[in-house]
Amino acid sequence: MSTAILWFRQDLRLADNPALAEAVSQHQHVIPLYIHSNTDAGEWALSGASLWWLHHSLTALKHSLQSTGSDLLLDQGKVQQVLEEIVSKYKVNAIYWNRQYEPWAINRDKQLKEHFTQKGLEVKSFNAALINEPWTITTKTETPYRVFTPYWKNCLAAGIDRPLLDQPEKLPALPKGLTGASIETLKLLDPINWHAGFNDVWIPGEEGAHAALTEFLDGTVNDYDTGRDVPGTTGTSRLSAHLHFGEISPRQVIAAVRREQTSEADANRYISEIGWREFAHHLLFHYPHTIDQPLNSKFEHFPWRQDFDLDLARWQQGQTGIPLVDAGMRELWHTGWMHNRVRMVVASFLIKNLQVHWLEGARWFWDTLVDADLASNTMGWQWCAGSGADAAPYFRIFNPVTQGERFDGAGDYVRKWVPELAKMPKKFLHKPSEAPAEVLQEAGVVLDENYPSPMVDLKQSRQAALDAYKEIKELS
Ligand SMILES: Cc1cc2nc3c(=O)[nH]c(=O)nc-3n(C[C@H](O)[C@H](O)[C@H](O)COP(=O)(O)OP(=O)(O)OC[C@H]3O[C@@H](n4cnc5c(N)ncnc54)[C@H](O)[C@@H]3O)c2cc1C
């Protein structure tokens, strides 16, 4: 009789889970295990909103495993120590896991593999999170890609449709006497229940992921190419947190989109967004220093502001006086998610109009996003700062007013998240400070009383950003 540990990490699902499929096919006993070990990741340890999601996702996984006859063993502490104890107590022969790509995880997993292999165990890892792992796609000269379009072209040429693995119907029971901590003992939920609103928006777990995918395929996908840019509607799939925690695989998502009778433009556009997620992992793997350093080294000399605390706080609280920015920051706080276009606008505002280092924004997103993902967050912020791969040039500065007028023309988004402005007419909704006194009065808006005036002049701060950029522009 042989026993394997299936170490769950960012692959909290039963279907299309290669490590699980292998463990079940090779061993009579399988111990599904999750270890909450939040110190390995340093500054990028799971935080606020992610921990909320994890709590619920693990609860869902535990239920699913129980319904197959097994259970999820929950533990916490140093990974090697936890594994060691279970290995010796239950005579474990093998440890299987699905790979992660964060630099800290790669180092830790390498050490664990060496350690347990030396002890005579079979240690195997698998790809469950990506279509193409970062080292499998290279340029003709075998270097990593830094530009998305040729990268994605190469991925498409290599093929992106992958066979799916079935969910095992029955799993062996846990060895006798093996019981783990209850989910509550992991203390993942912040006692200050700031995330109360998340419950109305999300259903973490594998079932929730498939429900979200079905909802997307039933409607939104058919207008994805244009609808994806409109923050006031549900124009996107909202699968990012499900994908991050591995409750659904990109292979499953692509296969489902392919099965739909949706237009080629919508399907290809959607699948290419999954491609951006892949590209983010490619960049993180090949340029791990970009988690806190610019990829474009010129930006090491950028004159970022040092005295930014108060301005950063206003941005975080959605009190900048720029309606689209405030709507985005409040959506983030209340739901743990923000629309992609608005993420770009709030990031541009922080980095350029306020000249605050992009890492400050990345850190806030890390704490508040349910989909916080080191690869995508790093790429997103470096893209907006102009310092990353295939990034928007620094001098292309979003104007949050015109962005609002263009993508939230009817104002549904701003009216929802900035209710102080709900009665403002369309014409001035995105620039209340320019509205005549009688318009403001009619809408019940008293600037600097119930809604702030813009914290910076957009034109002047844009120019200041361009002037700051001049200091590094000529550097090679
Ligand atoms: C500053 C900034 C920070 C970001 N931080 C994160 C983050 O921490 N985690 C995260 O998952 N995404 C991040 N993104 C990317 C993007 O905003 C989200 O993936 C997207 O909004 C999620 O919503 P959705 O699932 O409805 O996306 P959809 O439009 O339905 O796209 C489907 C999937 O494709 C992937 N995807 C879409 N756009 C991108 C993109 N630009 N980059 C990488 N993957 C993408 C996601 O996995 C997403 O779930 C960030 C973007 C910016 C500009």
Image (cartoon, rainbow, N blue to C red):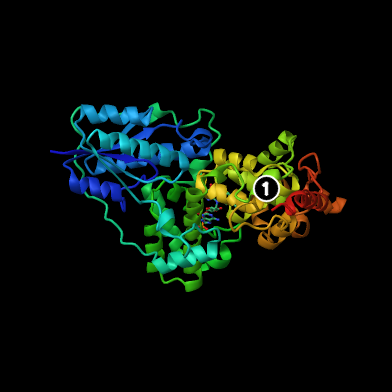
> Pointer 1: residues within 10 angstroms few (<14), some, or many (20+)?
many
Query: Residue visible at 67% across and 39% down?
Result: 317
Closer to us: 86 or 216 = 86
Left or right: 348, with 260 as reference point: right
Q: Relative to residue 305, is residue 409 depicted above or below?
A: below
**Kind of residue sitting beneath label 1:** Phe
* Residue 181 spot, x, y in % from top left: 33, 28
Q: Is mark 1 within 8 Å of ligand 1?
A: no
Please identify the quadrant where the N terminus is shown.
Answer: top left
Left or right: 390, with 53 as reference point: right
Residue sticking out furthest to the left: 1
Q: Is residue 371 visible?
A: no
Query: Residue visible at 46% across and 53% down?
Result: 239
The residue that disc 1 covers is 299
* Residue 309 spot, x, y in % from top left: 71, 34
Left or right: 378, with 471 as reference point: left
* Badge count: 1
Left or right: 177, with 42 as reference point: left
User: In the figure, residue 425 lies in which quadrant?
Assistant: bottom right
User: In the figure, residue 166 lies in which quadrant?
Assistant: bottom left
Q: SS of the residue at dot 1?
A: helix
* Residue 385 spot, x, y in % from top left: 66, 50
Q: Is residue 466 visible?
A: yes
Closer to us: 419 or 234 = 234
Residue sticking out furthest to the right: 437
Closer to us: 218 or 287 = 287
* Residue 204 spot, x, y in % from top left: 42, 45
